[in-house]
Image (spheres, rainbow, N blue to C red):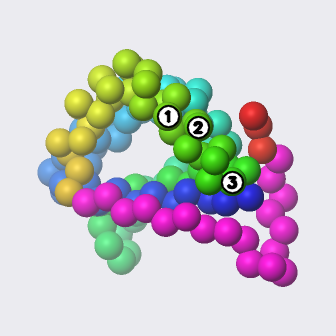
C-alpha cells in the first residue's frame, strides 16, 4: 500500500474561495475516481498557513496511475481545475509507504 500525500498552499486572500470551489466542484468527482481518501485537512494558525493537505491510499503506483487517468479524463475534473488552480500558490506531492513495523488498519476499495 502507498499513500499519496498532497499539500497545496493557497493564496491567502483566496483560501475560503478555494475551499468552496473544491467542495462544490472537486470533492465528489475526486472521491468518485480515486476512492480511499485517508484524510483532507486545512492548516490552522500554527506553522505554515493557508494550506490544505489530503492523503489518498492506493494498492501500488499502477493503481494510482489508473485511477488518476480516469480522474483526468472526467470533464467535471477539468471544470474544477479551471476554477480551483488559480487559487493555488504552490503544490507539493509525496508518495509514502508504511514503515516496516507499522501495518495501516485500512481496507482499500477498488
Residue 76 appears at what percent x and percent y?
39, 20
Q: Cα distance, mark 2 to mark 3?
A: 10 Å
Residue found 62% across the figure and 53% down from its top = 61
For residue 47, side relative to residue 31 (left or right): left
Residue found 27% across the figure and 37% down from its top = 84
In the displayed structure, would residue 6 be above or below residue 62?
below
Residue 98 appears at what percent x and percent y?
72, 71
Q: Which residue is mark 2?
A: 66
Residue 65 appears at what percent x and percent y?
55, 44
Q: Which residue is mark 3?
A: 60
Residue 39 visible in this rendered orientation of the protein:
no
In this view, the residue in front, 97 or 106, is 97
> Disc 1 on helix, strand or loop?
helix
Residue segment shown in magenta: 90-107
For residue 87, side relative to residue 51 (left or right): left
Q: Are marks 1 and 2 in contact (CB under 8 Å)?
A: yes
Q: Which residue is mark 1?
A: 69
> Disc 3 on helix, strand or loop?
loop
Amino acid at each position: 500500500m502507498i499513500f499519496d500525500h498532497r499539500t497545496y498552499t493557497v493564496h491567502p486572500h483566496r483560501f475560503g474561495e478555494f475551499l468552496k470551489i473544491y467542495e462544490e466542484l472537486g470533492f465528489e468527482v475526486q472521491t468518485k475516481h480515486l476512492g480511499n481518501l485517508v484524510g483532507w485537512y486545512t492548516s490552522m494558525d500554527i506553522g505554515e498557513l493557508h494550506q490544505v493537505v489530503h492523503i489518498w491510499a492506493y494498492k501500488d503506483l499502477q493503481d494510482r496511475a489508473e485511477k488518476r487517468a480516469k480522474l483526468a479524463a472526467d470533464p467535471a475534473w477539468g471544470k474544477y481545475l479551471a476554477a480551483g488552480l488559480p487559487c493555488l500558490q504552490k503544490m507539493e506531492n509525496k508518495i509514502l509507504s508504511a514503515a516496516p513495523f507499522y501495518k495501516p488498519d485500512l481496507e482499500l476499495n477498488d
